[in-house]
Image (spheres, helix red, strand yellow):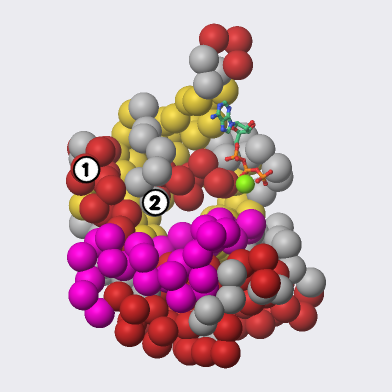
Amino acid sequence: MPDPAIVLSDVDLSLGSGAARVHILKRLSFAVEAGSSVGIVGPSGSGKSTLLMVLAGLERVDDGTVTVGGERLDRMDEDALARFRGRSVGIIFQSFHLMPTMTALENVAVPLELSGRRDAFERAEAELKAVGLSHRLHHHPAELSGGEQQRVAIARALAPEPSILIADEPTGNLDADTGRDIVRLMFEARARRGATLLLVTHDRTLAAACDRRIVMRSGEIVEDVVAETLS
Ligand SMILES: Nc1ncnc2c1ncn2[C@@H]1O[C@H](COP(=O)(O)OP(=O)(O)OP(=O)(O)O)[C@@H](O)[C@H]1O
Ligand SMILES: [Mg+2]
């Protein structure tokens, strides 16, 4: 693999305390080629979301190394991790996670502004236009449909031009047609920018649209298939 965007090596992670402690990721190792798309599937509770949180720098590992975009996340302090998150990863969740008190434009622009971009509002407007929302800039999330809210979330994730795009069941709360639109948008945006995409999904068709499919079970990778052989 010429240029891996992500390298995980022997990653171990448990969460919770006492009797509620759960061993979630078990000596997980894999590498992802820059610019590729990876679909992650597996039963509920197999550790898919936790894995994404690790890659996004939102969850620390107990053991092993996590290298994303050439940076060792396991060695970073909280400030460095926060900077990494603002700069290098875009995250899209199933439930959109928009700020209810902010307009669509503010939801995209304010994080950019906080990271020091002077052109935050211009950039946010351009990103919202790119996802077909130029007519909804001043709407609040409650005034938008689910598909529109997810478009705002995609614009927000893409605005800092991250090299890694992470999506956790991005179509889980949408009807099939809207879900397809959202997926098309995500894949187009990824291709245009050459970003690496990691996508957790219960949808086999969606997983098959990726260059590679990883199947997790009980915190381990039990199957890892590249596109040529995907059925
Ligand atoms: N903070 C936590 N403390 C204790 N256990 C946790 C914590 N977070 C997650 N878990 C447990 O870790 C396991 C993996 O959770 P995770 O959310 O990664 O699964 P998942 O594969 O994304 O599942 P789903 O498909 O339902 O979203 C689950 O059994 C969950 O209960
Ligand atoms: Mg999950």
Report the front residue among 63 and 214: 63
State the SS at label 2: loop
The residue that mark 1 highlights is 79
Q: What is the number of the mark on residue 56? A: 2
Specify the amino acid type for callout 1: Asp
Q: Is residue 175 above or below residue 25?
A: below
Are the residues tagged 2 and 1 within 8 Å (C-beta)?
Answer: no
Task: Tell whether circle 2 marks a residue whose Cβ is less than 8 angstroms from ligand 1.
Answer: no
Q: Is residue 149 left or right of residue 60?
A: right
State the SS at label 1: helix
Tell me which corner region of the image, top left, top right, bottom left or bottom right, holds residue 63: top left
Q: Which residues are magenta?
A: 90-119
Q: Is residue 176 left or right of residue 230?
A: right
Residue 168: where, in percent of width, then height?
57, 57
Q: Tell me, yes or no, whether the highlighted magenta stretch contains residue 94.
A: yes
Task: Tell whether circle 1 marks a residue whose Cβ is less than 8 angstroms from ligand 1.
Answer: no
Specify the amino acid type for callout 2: Ala
Q: Residue at x 25, y 38 (%)?
A: 78
Task: Give the class, few, some or many, for how many residues have Cα within 10 Å of label 1's Cα (few <14, many ≥20).
Answer: few
Q: Tell me, yes or no, whether the highlighted magenta stretch contains residue 109.
A: yes
Location of the N terminus by quadrant is bottom left
Location of the C terminus by quadrant is bottom right
Q: Residue at x 78, y 74 (%)?
A: 176
Tell me the distance, in whole angstroms, between the alpha carbons under discs 2 and 1.
14 Å
